[in-house]
Amino acid sequence: MPMLNMRFVLPDHVVDLNRVAELTGIRRAGETIEIGAMTRQRDLEFSQDIADACPLMSEALTHVGHRQTRNRGTIGGSLCHLDPAAELVCVAAALDAVVEVIGPNGRREIPFAEFPAGYMSPAIDYTEIVSRLTFPVWPRETGHAFVEFSRRHGDFAIVSAAAMLLLDGAGRITRAVLALGGVAATPLRMRDVEAALIGQVASIELIGKVAEMCRDVEAVGDVYVPASYRQHLACVMSRRALETALSRAGKSAAAAH
Amino acid sequence: MESVAETRTIDLKVNGKAYSRPVPVRMMLSDFLRHELKLTGTHVGCEHGVCGACTILFDGRSARSCLMLAVQANGHEITTVEGLASGAEMHPLQTALSEHHGLQCGFCTPGMLTTLVELLNDNPSPTAEDVRIAISGNLCRCTGYEGIVAATLEAAGRMRASAGERS
């Protein structure tokens, strides 16, 4: 709607999907979570299934706009709008989510890595709609964190970071994810940082070292924020996200024993 | 220009009263409330969802009326600031806001009230921090928010007390 109000988009037709009940809902199927495209941000924020299976998303949602916009905003809307600084977009990148779309030729699935065609442009056809987001559930002992830097609470992030770390019994990192929002035209997965973490014994020193790898990330500049500041924030937010994820890693497992 | 004149008839309830009106399909809900129903208590500031002045309750949930089309309200219930008082008796939040200098120019007030009424319905005992987070999407340029936060905490206490008396 803001895009309509500001005349950034001039569609011939607008179709309201709010009454298509099949597009709404959160379903846990084994080790997978399925979220209907028209599921409201508010319902995700307060969902026990999401809190249990994907606390990263729960944490990110508290940064999404405000109560009044989360009451109406949907996950499908966030994904299709595809603002590179949007929290749910960053989370979808971190989770290796799969986006299901429906069109005249039926359903097809798009891995999230291939979903952004460019700045604010999803790789879907004009005749298609996003119908569902699916992603795997990480083990309970995973450490997660979503952090962001923005000028005011509720603003789009200047830079956000989503991190997940899974450790083995010896404190060695077995799985690592780091995604950055707001840095470039599309959300970034920092695969070189992830590779540098996996197999290493987790420590604050290690995190401080690998976070510096974000210094050279290709960043966009605009009238408010130069690219060099985004690169600086990419390091800082990566470090904070990974440190918090590490501090939370393994706690659920420890508590369960 | 045919599409500009295209209309749909919508049936909705606003502040408990049923309406059936033809509306242009491109009309925003905020403009419908103000220009068609003459409920000018809902204010329109930024018109892209940032300032919070146009906040209404849509089926009991706070929402930006500038981010919805009037046709989307078909079959739904809306509460605007005009619907908060019972006759001459103001909502406890309205009374407290007036006592605590929670408003000066009044532009943000309708959005503050609808947002905070939802908060108090969900959480009868909010902390000052809860109140600040709730109104983080409502811009006020006069009061500095302190009076609004104080008024909300006081109203919450009075509402808890009167709920206690009733039960």
Image (cartoon, helix red, strand yellow):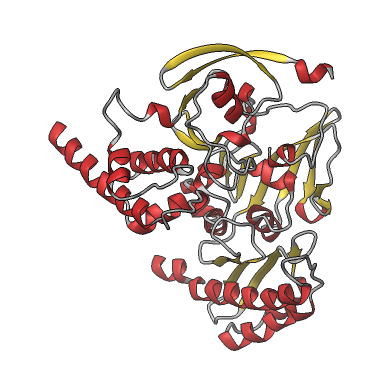
Residue at x 50%, y 48% (from the top left corner): B138
Q: Quadrant of the N terminus of chain A?
A: top right
Residue B145, compared with residue B19, is above or below; it is: below
Q: Where residue B66 sits in the image (x, y, percent)?
A: 61, 35
Residue A198 visible to the viewer = no
- Residue in the foreground of this view, choosing between B146 and A153: B146
Give the camera-side residue of A116 and A152. A152
Q: Nearer the viewer, residue A199 or A1?
A: A1
Q: Residue at the spot x=80%, y=19% of the render?
A: B3
User: What residue sits 41% from the left and 54% below the top?
Assistant: B143
Give the residue at x 30% y 34%. Answer: B91
Tell me: residue A211, above or below residue A10.
below
Tell me if I can see residue B115 in this picture.
yes
Q: What is the number of callouts on the image?
A: 0
Q: Residue B122, how many percent across, how many down?
A: 36, 41
Query: Within the image, what quadrant is residue A155 found in?
Result: bottom right
- In the rendered image, the residue lying farthest to the left is B165
The x and y percentages for residue B56 are 49, 34
Q: Considering depth in this image, is A98 or A226 the residue closer to the camera? A: A226
Q: Residue furthest front?
A: B105
Left or right relative to A176: residue B44:
left
Query: Which of the 4 image quadrants contains residue A23?
Result: top right
Residue found at the far bottom of this picture:
A205
In the image, residue A143 lies at what x, y percent? Answer: 54, 68
Quadrant of image for the C terminus of chain A: bottom left
Name above or below for residue A9 compared with residue A234: above
